Amino acid sequence: MKVAAQIGLFDSDARVIVDDPSGRIVYYPSALEAGQAAGLFASLLETVPWRSERRMMYDREVDVPRLVASLPIDGELPPAVAAVVPLIERLSDARFTSIGFNLYRDGRDSVAPHNDRLPELVAGVPIALLSLGATRRMTIRSKAQPRRVLDLDLDSGSLLVMSYETQYHYDHGIPKTDAQVGPRISAAFRMRSKATQREMKA
């Protein structure tokens, strides 16, 4: 299912994707205006401390197919990032402590279907995903049968807010694509548990 962007901003443009006992997922196609989204994308490319990672998979170490970074919200955020935090928190109706960044350099970069690590998060607080740059498709699929699959094209400047409960019931991922696509940045706003915050600062 593709949710098309329409003219409009913020709450009036919200699209409710899921709202039932499994949780709530809301998509804001135009959380940021086009110019602000483009400026933030360019700023993040230059200022975020991007790094590559490797991880074990099938008994061997492989490259993570994207670049990553993370910043605490109570630290020194780049000004362009700090400027959007109040908006993200208002639309999400939550306060956040950290931002995790993913840079998908082209269609070969991806993230496998997963749910967030719930022990690292504060129960009841949603996760907000801000998309910048090229449009990429996110696949959201239910864990229970019959399998429910939602395909959502995440446009630049859009915000996807997933309730804490959805992480029990759905996986989400960005699949690879053969299409010619430019780079995309995902900024994931989370409320980390105090123990996780201490570990991140150690």
Image (cartoon, rainbow, N blue to C red):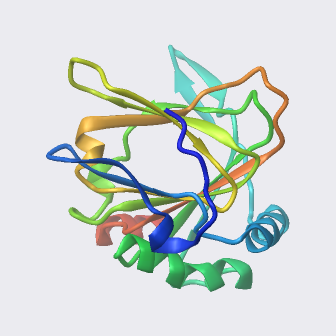
Residue 23 image position (x, y, % from top left): 23, 49
Which residue sits at x=36%, y=66%? 192
Q: Does residue 82 lie above or below 174 as drawn? A: below
Quadrant of the rendered image containing residue 79: bottom right
Q: Does residue 173 lie above or below 87 as drawn? A: above
Residue 97 in sight in this render: no
Residue 13 image position (x, y, % from top left): 50, 65
Residue 153 image position (x, y, % from top left): 60, 40
Q: Nearer the viewer, residue 169 or 2?
A: 2
Residue 105 in sight in this render: yes
Q: Nearer the viewer, residue 190 or 166?
A: 166
Which residue sits at x=39%, y=70%? 92
Residue 188 image position (x, y, % from top left): 52, 59
Horizontal side of 65 relative to 2 (left or right) equals right
Which residue reaches farthest front? 7
Which residue sits at x=85%, y=66%? 46
